[in-house]
């Protein structure tokens, strides 16, 4: 597992593919010809070949910023959002630099799922509870509990009882 300062050259192949797919989808905001022109400009002017963008997202982001000026932030944000969405991660990087977001997404995509807490074993029912369930009386009545005239007769029989 790597920290946010990991070596981008060690990006795993599935992440690399997801990264390029996210960049391609976000670049389509410019249209197919705009995307191709940008890729050409990145390679010829900035000497950034497509298969190296994932190795240094800082250089890639800087080149995109030089090409598009302030508008580059919208494009980079779209790339980061697409990357997070493709990895099934929650995007929370409104004002954070693109390269940080890429490294964070790579780290989170490699993190194993958190373990589930173990299930608590079922407890045996308490003895009184078990007796109540086995009793013939309805659940809402306690054993020996009488209502109405029956209750009055019981009270009369009990020495020291009411009545």
Image (tube, rainbow, N blue to C red):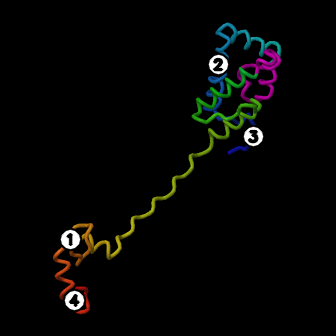
Q: Position of residue 78 (x, y in %)?
A: 67, 23
**Mark 1 or mark 4, which is nearer the start of the sequence?**
1
Judging by the rendered image, the residue that carries numbered circle 2 is 24
Q: Position of residue 149 (x, y in %)?
A: 16, 75
Magenta span has 63? yes
CA separation in Å, label 3 and label 4: 84 Å
* Front position among marks 2 and 3: 2
Q: In the rendered image of this protein, does residue 12 appear above or below residue 122?
A: above
Residue at 74%, 12% (x, y): give it.
38
State yes or no: residue 139 in magenta. Answer: no
Q: Are marks 2 and 1 in contact (CB under 8 Å)?
A: no
Mark 1 or mark 3: whose residue is earlier in sequence: 3
Q: Give the position of the C terminus as an image quadrant.
A: bottom left
Q: Quick check: 51 left or right of 155?
A: right
Report the Cα–Cα distance between label 2 and label 1. 72 Å
Badge 4 density bin: few <14, some 14–19, many ≥20, Cα 10 Å: few
Q: Which residues are magenta?
A: 48-72
Mark 3 lies on residue: 6
- In x, y percent, where is residue 90? 61, 36
Circles 2 and 4: CB atoms closer than 8 Å = no
Residue assigned mark 1: 137
Label 2 neighbour load within 10 Å: few <14, some 14-19, many 20+: some
Q: Which element type, helix, strand or loop, lies under badge 2?
A: helix
Q: CA distance from mark 4 to mark 1?
A: 22 Å
């Amino acid at each position: 597992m790597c920290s946010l300062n990991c070596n981008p050259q060690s990006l795993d192949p599935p992440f690399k593919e997801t990264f390029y797919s996210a960049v391609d989808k976000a670049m389509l905001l410019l249209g197919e010809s705009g995307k191709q022109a940008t890729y050409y400009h990145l390679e010829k002017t900035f000497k950034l070949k497509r298969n190296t963008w994932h190795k240094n997202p800082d250089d890639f982001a800087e080149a995109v910023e030089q090409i598009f000026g302030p508008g580059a932030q919208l494009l980079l944000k779209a790339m980061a959002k697409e990357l997070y969405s493709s990895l099934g991660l929650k995007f929370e990087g409104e004002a954070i630099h693109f390269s940080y977001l890429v490294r964070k997404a790579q780290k989170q995509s490699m993190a194993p799922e958190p373990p589930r807490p173990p299930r608590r074993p079922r407890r045996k029912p308490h003895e009184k509870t078990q007796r109540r369930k086995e009793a013939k009386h309805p659940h809402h009545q306690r054993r020996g509990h009488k209502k109405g005239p029956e209750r009055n007769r019981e009270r009369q029989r009990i020495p020291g009882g009411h009545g």
